[in-house]
């Protein structure tokens, strides 16, 4: 029996609003638009809306999913904010330790907390999404963005964005082991795509993958007999890590469009 699709809450809210609901590529819902515009991160925006601190076109709006458009006038605590939507991408140098998860039951700390601790006030109001995952003990380049479309673009399998890892491994990988990594290794979840694999120094393998499966580098290297001792990511697309551990910087528009292959402009798919 076909399962009944649940109507998204933003669509219910837009239907309630009727023909006045903003439409078009710039339409959004209130809590998300505030997060994308850097006014308040999503959870803070939802709370502020429920608390009656947000006005839309002169009226208090208590529905976080209320539709808004480019021309909507929004005030938070009496201060008017433009809902300007601009894609930001941050390069962050992840240290070993924090998890790339919103929840942290073990209390080890999250990368979101680490990032927020070094962000200037003008970047605190955004909702930041991690672009893909790194294991807790993996260091290196982790991208964050305020736009979920970029997360989807960078992580969906068909994008094949190259990710360059440097792994210190047990033993000294032979040319035959590197050839297996290049051709594809059979893992429990299927064969890996062809990859680049070079020996940078004895026991240090640089592996460039165009897919992102769970623990993929560790599983591939273990499969060829060289378990990983330490793992670091130094590049994503054509963007190479160039900030110190624990620090961040904004990517330029050229790095976003050319380095990550993310289309610019307003005609991006939602
Ligand atoms: N592959 C892994 O095994 N771990 C990571 O953190 C990233 C890729």
Image (cartoon, helix red, strand yellow):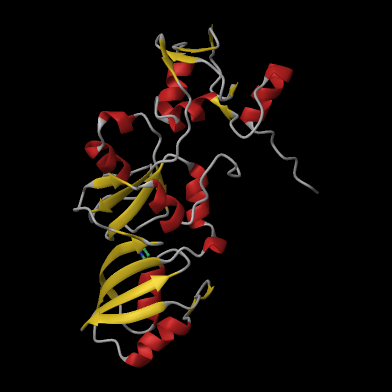
Q: Quadrant of residue 20?
A: top right
71 or 236: which is nearer to us? 71
Residue 212: give x, y in percent of width and height: 45, 64
Single out the residue that lies furthest toward the right: 1
Q: In which quarter of the image is residue 121?
A: top left
Q: Quadrant of residue 232?
A: bottom left
Q: In this view, does 27 lie to the left or right of 96?
A: right
Q: Is residue 241 left or right of residue 129?
A: left
226 or 234: which is nearer to us? 234
Please name the residue shown 40% across and 35% down the image. Answer: 127
Q: In this view, does 201 lie to the left or right of 110?
A: left
Residue 43: give x, y in percent of width and height: 42, 28
Q: Is residue 177 above or below residue 101?
A: below
157 or 122: which is nearer to us? 122
Please name the residue shown 28% across and 70% down the image. Answer: 166
The quadrant of the image that shows the C terminus is top right
Q: Is residue 95 visible?
A: yes
Q: Quadrant of ligand 1?
A: bottom left
């Amino acid at each position: 029996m076909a399962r009944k699709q649940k109507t998204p809450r933003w669509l219910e809210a837009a239907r309630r609003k009727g023909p006045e609901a903003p439409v078009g590529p710039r339409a959004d819902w209130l809590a998300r638009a505030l997060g994308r515009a850097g006014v308040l991160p999503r959870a803070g925006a939802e709370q502020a809306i429920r608390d009656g601190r947000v006005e839309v076109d002169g009226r208090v709006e208590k529905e976080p999913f209320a539709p808004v458009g480019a021309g909507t006038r929004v005030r938070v605590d009496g201060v008017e904010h433009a809902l300007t939507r601009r894609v930001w991408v941050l390069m962050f140098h992840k240290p070993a330790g924090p998890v790339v998860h919103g929840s942290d039951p073990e209390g080890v700390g999250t990368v979101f907390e680490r990032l927020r601790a070094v962000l200037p006030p003008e970047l605190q109001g955004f909702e930041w999404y991690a672009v893909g995952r790194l294991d807790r003990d993996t260091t290196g380049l982790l991208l964050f963005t305020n736009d979920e479309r970029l997360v989807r673009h960078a992580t969906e399998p068909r994008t094949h964005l190259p990710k360059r890892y440097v792994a210190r491994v047990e033993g000294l990988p032979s040319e035959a082991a590197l050839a297996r990594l290049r051709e594809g290794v059979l893992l429990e979840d299927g064969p890996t795509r062809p990859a680049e694999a070079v020996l940078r120094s004895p026991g240090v393998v640089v592996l460039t993958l165009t897919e992102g499966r769970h623990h993929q580098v560790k599983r591939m290297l273990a499969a060829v007999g060289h378990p990983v001792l330490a793992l670091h990511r130094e590049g994503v697309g054509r963007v190479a890590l160039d900030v110190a551990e624990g620090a961040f910087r904004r990517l330029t528009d050229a790095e976003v469009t050319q380095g990550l292959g993310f289309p610019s402009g307003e005609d991006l798919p939602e």
